[in-house]
Amino acid sequence: MTAASTLPPETLEAVEGLSVERRGPVLHIRLDRPGARNALTPAMYGELRRSIQAAAADCATRAVLVTASGPAFCAGNDAAGFDLVRRLPKHERPGYRFMQALTQFSKPLIAAVSGNAVGIGATMLLHFDLVYCTPDARFHFPFTRLGLVPEFASSYFLPRMAGHARAARWLLLGEPMSASEARDIGLVSAITSDDLVEADARSAAERLAALPASSVDACRALMRAPKRQCAAEIMAAEMDQLSELISSDETRARLARLKSPKET
């Protein structure tokens, strides 16, 4: 992992599965665990949170771009992390602390998505400003199939973006959302080719970074102000429900059947 010297020292610590590098005014975060479809481990959550908080404090960083290695964007939470979720109170859970940091971030967030975005790999995108994806991208919210509930305020945002009936297909039935559906409801900014998706996202990040920072950040804050308090409250309620369900026999049995870190 590399980073500019203006970033706080903690962002210089290498974490397996994650690459963080500041390229000019854009902090580029790459999920780099393709063998596990970029499923997020507790260590990755921790470094994501620290990198985002460092970018917020660094005046030279004007935008954050998130990309991924391999054919999938993110398979969600690594299955091994569920035992940690059971043991820790919600405010100490690495995933929940990452969620809070992301929703409190004050600068533009841009993502390039190829292939599957599952669980938190999909719900985190609800808090991004610009999302570019490939035609084969699919967004999966398989929480009920695992005996869990949605997170990252997706239970609030998706019904309001798409209407209850469509959101029920994705959140209740766990059906995948196509790239065109994601674009139609505003989760995705544009669908582009496999060859261009990362370049288009990077170009957008650089264009935003070239604009007056005070203007961009103030505009973003105004756009997100009505959502911020709701998101915090809904995320806390979702996590309370998850805390109850994750220790149930049915949910534990379903999670135990996961043979690889791919489902949430």
Image (tube, helix red, strand yellow):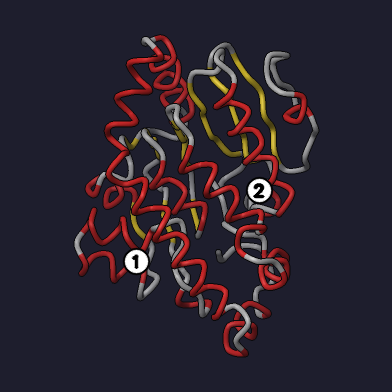
Give the total number of marks visible in the rendering.
Answer: 2
Tag 1: amino acid? Trp
Q: Is residue 35 left or right of residue 26?
A: right
In the rendered image, the quadrant that contains the N terminus is top right
In the image, residue 174 above or below residue 125: below
x and y percent of residue 176 in the render?
Answer: 38, 63
Tag 2: amino acid? Tyr
In the image, residue 129 above or below residue 115: above
| Label 2 packing within 10 angstroms: few (<14), some (14-19), many (20+) | many
Q: Disc 1 to disc 2, how far (Cα)?
A: 25 Å
Q: Identify the image quadrant of residue 260.
A: bottom right
| Label 1 packing within 10 angstroms: few (<14), some (14-19), many (20+) | many
In the image, residue 41 above or below residue 90: above
| Disc assigned to residue 170 | 1
Q: Earlier in the sequence, mark 1 or mark 2?
A: 2
**At 49% across and 18% down in the image, what residue appears?**
62
Q: Which residue is mark 2?
A: 45
What secondary structure is found at the residue carrying circle 2?
helix
| Front-most of residues 95 and 190 | 95
Badge nearest the viewer, 1 or 2? 2
x and y percent of residue 61 in the render?
Answer: 55, 18
x and y percent of residue 71 in the render?
Answer: 57, 45
x and y percent of residue 78 in the render?
Answer: 67, 60
